[in-house]
Image (cartoon, rainbow, N blue to C red):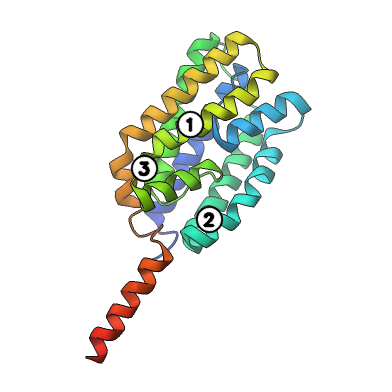
Amino acid sequence: MNSFAPKRLGMIVLGCVLVSLGLLLLRHAQVVTGGTAGLALSLSYLLQLPFAGLFFVINIPFYIFSFMRMGWSFTLSTIVSVCLVSLVSSLGAFLPLPTMPALVGTVIGSVLCGLGLSTLFMNRASLGGVNIVALFLQQRFGWNPGMVNFIFDSMVVCIGFYSVGWYEAILSMLSVVIVSSIISYFKQRIANGNGRVAAPRQERSKAATQTTEAVSS
């Protein structure tokens, strides 16, 4: 299978652009979201460092897990996606954003993030971190990736409470609910798109053994 067929690559780029725009709106509203993106946002508030660089660095440890459990194709797609979001986010920081109430920015930004992440998931890619774990658990145990993201994202948002006010903290939880709900809505399509990517190594080995035995007999 071509890892970056034109249609798939186009969908990955679309997903990255949607997530990047959503993150820009959330950052403009001083809202923390979940995952490694939310953690990077929190640290960017606290440390006054660029989001794009933090986002890329935080994801590095998860690439090892992805390569071992999800395969090189998924890992490469994830690295490309993280780089694209980091690039678009850094360029988008120079673009003027429309002035809107924080609540409106939170809802729109969260919807964009949810749609973008779902698009990436359905095309065998992610933005690293919890996304990788969620997809692995869905494939291995049938867990709902939206619920897995919700649990982990809630913990990230709790950490981010120290970097934002209480109103922004409430909006942050709203953001997590919206993003997780959208991912849950597309969970079946995500499962269909990743059916072969995260196949456990034991099952692949068993299948290979059965094939060899069949040929031998």
- Mark 2 to mark 1 CA distance (whole Å): 20 Å
Residue at (61% x, 34% y) in the render: 89
Q: Amino acid at mark 1?
A: Ile
Image position, residue 150 (x, y; %): 46, 30
* Secondary structure category for the residue under label 2: helix
Q: Amino acid at mark 3?
A: Trp
Question: In this figure, which residue is indicated by the disc labeled 3?
Answer: 143
Q: Amino acid at mark 2?
A: Ser
Q: CA distance from mark 1 to mark 3?
A: 12 Å
Mark 3: few/some/many CA within 10 Å (<14, 14-19, 20+): some
Give the quarter of the image for residue 4: bottom left
The residue located at (32%, 40%) in the rendering is 187
Q: Is residue 46 above or below residue 54?
A: above
Q: Single out the residue that lies furthest toward the bottom.
A: 216
Q: With respect to residue 149, does 74 lie above or below?
A: below
Q: Is residue 188 left or right of residue 70?
A: left
Q: Visible in this render: residue 180?
A: yes
Query: Quadrant location of residue 115?
Result: top left
Looking at the image, residue 214 sits to the left or right of residue 179; the answer is left
Question: Mark 3 or mark 2: which is in front?
Answer: 3
Going from N to C along the chain, the mark reached first, 3 or 2, is 2
Discs 2, 1 touching: Cβ within 8 Å:
no
Q: CA distance from mark 3 to mark 2?
A: 18 Å
Image quadrant in which the N terminus is located: bottom left
The disc placed on residue 151 is 1
Above or below residue 188? Residue 175 is: above
Q: Earlier in the sequence, mark 1 or mark 3?
A: 3
Q: Which numbered tag is attached to residue 66?
A: 2
